[in-house]
Image (tube, grey):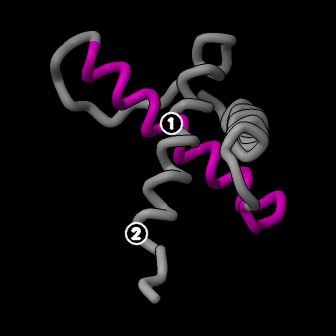
Amino acid sequence: MNLLAWVVLGLLAGAIAKAIYPGYQSGGILATLLLGVVGAFVGGTLVNLLQTGTLTLTSATLSLPGLFVAVLGAIIAIFLYYQFTRRAY
């Protein structure tokens, strides 16, 4: 996938995931882009694991199913980020 497709998929997936996930997520456009790209890798890897049974680092493609997978991966990434950075009071 070329760089422009990664940027478009990252921005779309990150923005949709931030809109769906409850609460406030800080970060600007760069954080949203990074979240979407990480989500594409997380979602693509999980779908590949479920389909083939092998753990291979892959990314989702720039398509409607790929966007759906990337959004799910970005939501998982947000959840994991807040689980590991949660403050204990």
| Residue labelled with disc 2 | 84
Q: List the residue tagged with mark 1.
A: 73
Q: Crowding near pointer 2: few (<14 within 10 Å), some, many (20+)?
A: few
> Of 5 and 28, which appears nearest the observer?
28
**Mark 2 → mark 1, Cα distance in angstroms:** 16 Å
> From the viewer's perspective, is 15 left or right of 88?
right
| Residue 82 point in image, percent of width and height | 51, 64
Residue pushed farthest front?
A: 89
Q: List the single residue furthest toward the left.
A: 53
Identity of the residue drawn at 36% across and 31% down? 45
Question: What residue range appears in magenta?
Answer: 25-50
| Percent of width and height locating residue 65 | 60, 11
Asked if residue 9 lies in the magenta stretch, the reply is no
Q: Nearer the viewer, residue 2 or 10?
A: 10
Residue 49: give x, y in percent of width and height: 25, 23
Q: What residue is at 77 percent from the left and 34 percent from the top?
A: 12
